[in-house]
């Protein structure tokens, strides 16, 4: 993998800004488990994706990556439209903050 990617993770993570995200965008470099200074076993991830740069990098275990979309352009990070179903079954539309962490 070379270039910038939008990576969706299995679970939410907390970024350095204190907010929770479920995706990260930035330059990607794939590394082995030695990046964390520990040797993992067969029950753990043995490769990681380092995403971002300029001190905003995030390291994601390979087993936590759901999707990787090549995207050289920075994704939209403003408020986004979302929806959920109410108890009565109706659809409620709303706006929410982005779930994408920009790691650059």
Image (cartoon, rainbow, N blue to C red):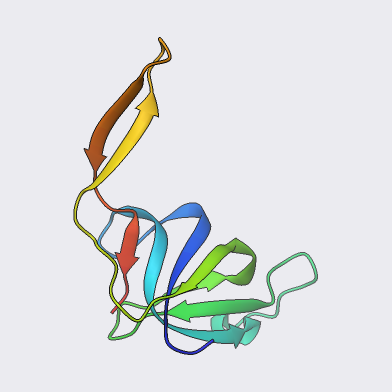
Q: Quadrant of residue 103?
A: bottom left
Q: Quick one: 84 or 31, which is closer to the camera?
A: 84
Q: Is residue 44 above or below residue 88?
A: below
Q: Quadrant of residue 71?
A: bottom left
The single residue placed furthest to the top in the displayed view is 88
The single residue placed furthest to the right in the displayed view is 42
Q: Is residue 15 above or below residue 88?
A: below
Which residue occupies 69% across, 77% down?
46
Which residue occupies 59% across, 62% down?
64
Percent from the top left, x then y, of residue 72?
A: 35, 81
Q: Which quadrant of the rendered structure holds the N terminus?
A: bottom right
Q: Quick one: 34 or 51, which is closer to the camera?
A: 51
Q: Which quadrant of the rendered structure holds the C terminus?
A: bottom left
Percent from the top left, x then y, of residue 70?
A: 45, 77
Which residue occupies 31% across, 39% down?
82
Q: Is residue 50 above or below residue 88?
A: below
Q: Is residue 36 left or right of residue 57?
A: right
Percent from the top left, x then y, of residue 93?
A: 28, 30
């Amino acid at each position: 993998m070379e270039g910038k990617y939008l990576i969706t993770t299995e679970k939410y993570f907390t970024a350095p800004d204190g907010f929770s995200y479920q995706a990260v965008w930035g330059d990607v470099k794939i590394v082995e488990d030695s990046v964390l200074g520990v040797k993992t076993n067969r029950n753990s991830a043995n490769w990681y994706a380092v995403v971002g740069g300029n001190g905003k990098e995030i390291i994601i275990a390979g087993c936590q990556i759901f999707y990787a979309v090549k995207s050289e352009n920075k994704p939209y990070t403003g408020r986004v439209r979302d929806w959920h179903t109410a108890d009565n079954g109706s659809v409620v539309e709303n706006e929410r903050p982005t779930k994408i962490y920009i790691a650059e």
